[in-house]
Every structure is written in structure tokens, then in C-alpha cells.
């Protein structure tokens, strides 16, 4: 339930052994939107690399390749020509975790990308536009999902995919709606068959079996400067990087959320999203990783 720190087991999983090489830590694929829309995906990719994924590739439309090449170095690039290009890329079994949504764009192509990624049965993080693209047909979305998927909505995105559950939250008159939020997230995970991470002052994580974790960013643990553009994209990248490293969806969501909050507290006032991945080495040092 409420977490003040990571469990020793999860901290141990963050460590790397000296005899391992980069492919032992997975290869994450982060999908990007077109020209002028790559910033969110680059944030996610940077976070996935910083959290320990062995390799990270940013997949983007061919026309956005030069723009992204000017912005990244350790992150690899691959041109993807629509959902057919994604399908071709996923023929490589070493790509073992996918992130889509940040800056992807809300269009038919987004839906097709989601279908291809989920059909591969690989661990996948679905955020932002990947969720919103199915707002008019959540049932079709749920039919595609599986237990290796992690949804990372804020409250607005949660309402688009689970409108009835969000309506119950909005209708509750109590000042503290934590019990109702717990019930809503648990029901959402059971309904869609995937892990759901609902972002907020109290972040809630539920999986289809009913496991629930809470991260309270309140009181001394508060990190109010996380309320900034791109912060959620970093969180999506953290979860993706952990999935690439072999964490289960629930473990990746819980650990990623905790690291995100810890980075926010470490940086404090004035942080911007670009700072968050760069705070991870200090957080790992504090954990003894």
C-alpha cells in the first residue's frame, strides 16, 4: 500500500552485475511523432536509457529523422514508415519493450501502431496519444490489451478510456476520494486486463489480479514541481526501461513511479522535465545501487 521507499527486492533488481553486457538489460523502442513532435518521445527515451535499459532506439517517421538526429547521441534512431514499418522493426526479437503515446499524434496511424505493438505480445507502455486515440471506442482498445501492457494515464486520459469510472470519481462529494480512486483503478485494471498507473498526488497502480500499490507524493514526500510539461513522458520512459530490463509490468510501474517522485524531490523547485533523467545517478547512489 502506501510506499515511503522501494522494497529491498526492487532495489536489488535495479543493480547490474559486472559480468553482464548491454543486451542483458534489454532494448527499448520508443515511438516518436512527426517533425516538430519528437520532444516528448526523446524525453521518454532518455529516461529509459538512464534507468538502465541496455539500448534504446527512437523510432520516428523518415521525415523526422534529421530533427531527432540533431538531438540525441547515445539513443539510436530508426526510421519507421507507418505501422508497416513498426511491424518490420518488431521482427527483431531483441526489441523487448515498447513505449508509444508521447507526441505520437491522435490519428488512425496511432491506432494502427497500438494494434501492431500489442499484437507482438511484448511489454508495452501506452501513454498520452496512444490512449486518447481510442477515446471513441474503449472496448476495441480493451480487446487488444494483454497482461504485458501498462497504461499510464493522468485523470483526463483516464476519463477518456474509462468514462464511467471517472464519472463516479467526479460525482463523489467527499474532500478525500482516495477510497473511490482505489476502487476505480482496481476496476479499470480488471476490465482492460492490463496494469493501470493513474498519476496524481497519490499515484495508484493496479494490475488485473487485484494487486494495488500507492505512492503518496504528499507532506514531506511531496514533489510539486513535477507538475511541468514532459514530466509524464519521463515517467513513461522509466517504466519502459524497467520493462526492457525484465521487471514485471506491476514492478516496473511501481519502481518507475517511485524513482520519478524521488527525482522530483531531489531536484526541487525550478526543475524541468529534461532534468529528471539526469537526477537518477544520484538517486541510485542513495539507494546503494
Image: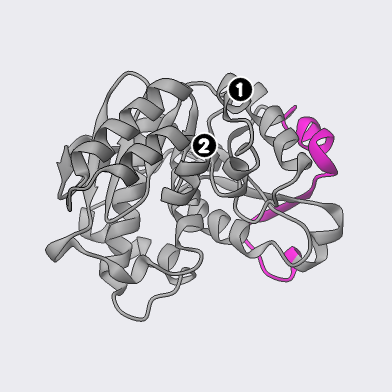
| Label 1 CA crowd tier, 10 Å (few <14, some 14–19, many 20+) | some
Lateral position of residue 143 relative to residue 203, left or right: right
The stretch in magenta equals 68-91
Residue 178: tell me if it is visible: yes
- Which residue is located at x 57 percent, y 54 percent? 45
Tell me the distance, in whole angstroms, between the alpha carbons under discs 2 and 1: 13 Å
Q: Nearer the viewer, residue 131 or 19?
A: 131
Residue under pointer 1: 144
| Label 2 CA crowd tier, 10 Å (few <14, some 14–19, many 20+) | many
Residue under pointer 2: 161
Q: Nearer the viewer, residue 200 or 139?
A: 139
Residue 184 occupies quadrant: top left
Position of the N terminus by quadrant: top left
Lateral position of residue 202 relative to residue 32, left or right: left
Task: Give me the disc on residue 165.
Answer: none
- Which residue is located at x 27 percent, y 40 percent? 181
Q: Nearer the viewer, mark 2 or mark 1?
A: 2
Lateral position of residue 78 relative to residue 252, left or right: right
Picture coordinates of residue 58, whole percent (x, y): 67, 51
Q: Nearer the viewer, residue 110 or 89?
A: 110
Lateral position of residue 177 relative to residue 113, left or right: left
Residue 81 part of the magenta segment? yes
Q: Is residue 207 above or below residue 280?
A: above
Picture coordinates of residue 39, whole percent (x, y): 63, 65
Residue 264 part of the magenta segment? no
Amino acid at each position: 500500500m502506501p510506499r515511503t521507499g522501494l522494497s529491498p527486492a526492487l532495489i536489488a533488481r535495479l543493480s547490474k552485475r559486472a559480468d553482464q553486457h548491454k543486451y542483458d538489460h534489454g532494448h527499448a523502442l520508443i515511438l516518436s511523432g512527426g517533425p516538430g513532435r519528437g520532444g516528448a518521445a526523446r524525453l521518454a527515451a532518455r529516461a529509459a536509457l538512464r534507468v538502465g535499459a541496455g539500448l534504446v532506439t527512437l523510432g520516428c517517421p523518415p521525415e523526422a529523422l534529421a530533427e531527432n538526429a540533431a538531438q540525441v547521441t547515445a539513443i539510436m534512431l530508426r526510421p519507421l514508415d507507418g505501422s508497416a514499418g513498426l511491424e518490420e522493426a518488431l521482427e527483431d526479437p531483441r526489441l523487448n519493450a515498447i513505449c508509444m503515446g508521447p507526441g505520437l499524434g491522435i490519428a488512425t496511424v496511432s491506432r494502427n501502431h497500438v494494434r501492431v505493438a500489442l499484437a507482438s505480445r511484448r511489454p508495452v507502455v501506452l501513454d498520452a496519444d496512444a490512449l486518447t486515440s481510442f477515446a471513441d471506442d474503449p472496448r476495441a482498445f480493451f480487446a487488444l490489451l494483454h497482461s504485458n501492457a501498462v497504461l499510464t494515464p493522468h485523470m483526463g486520459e483516464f476519463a477518456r478510456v474509462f468514462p464511467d469510472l471517472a464519472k463516479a470519481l467526479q460525482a463523489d462529494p467527499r474532500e478525500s476520494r482516495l477510497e473511490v480512486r482505489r476502487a476505480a483503478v482496481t476496476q479499470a485494471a480488471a476490465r482492460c486486463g492490463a496494469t493501470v498507473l493513474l498519476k496524481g498526488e497519490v499515484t495508484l497502480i493496479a494490475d488485473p489480479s487485484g494487486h494495488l500499490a500507492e505512492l503518496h507524493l504528499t507532506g514531506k514526500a511531496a514533489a510539486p514541481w513535477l507538475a511541468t510539461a514532459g514530466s509524464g513522458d519521463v515517467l513513461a520512459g522509466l517504466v519502459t526501461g524497467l520493462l526492457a530490463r525484465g521487471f514485471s509490468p506491476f514492478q516496473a510501474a511501481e519502481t518507475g513511479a517511485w524513482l520519478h517522485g524521488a527525482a522530483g524531490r531531489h531536484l526541487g523547485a525550478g526543475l524541468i522535465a529534461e532534468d529528471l533523467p539526469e537526477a537518477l545517478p544520484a538517486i541510485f547512489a542513495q539507494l546503494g545501487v
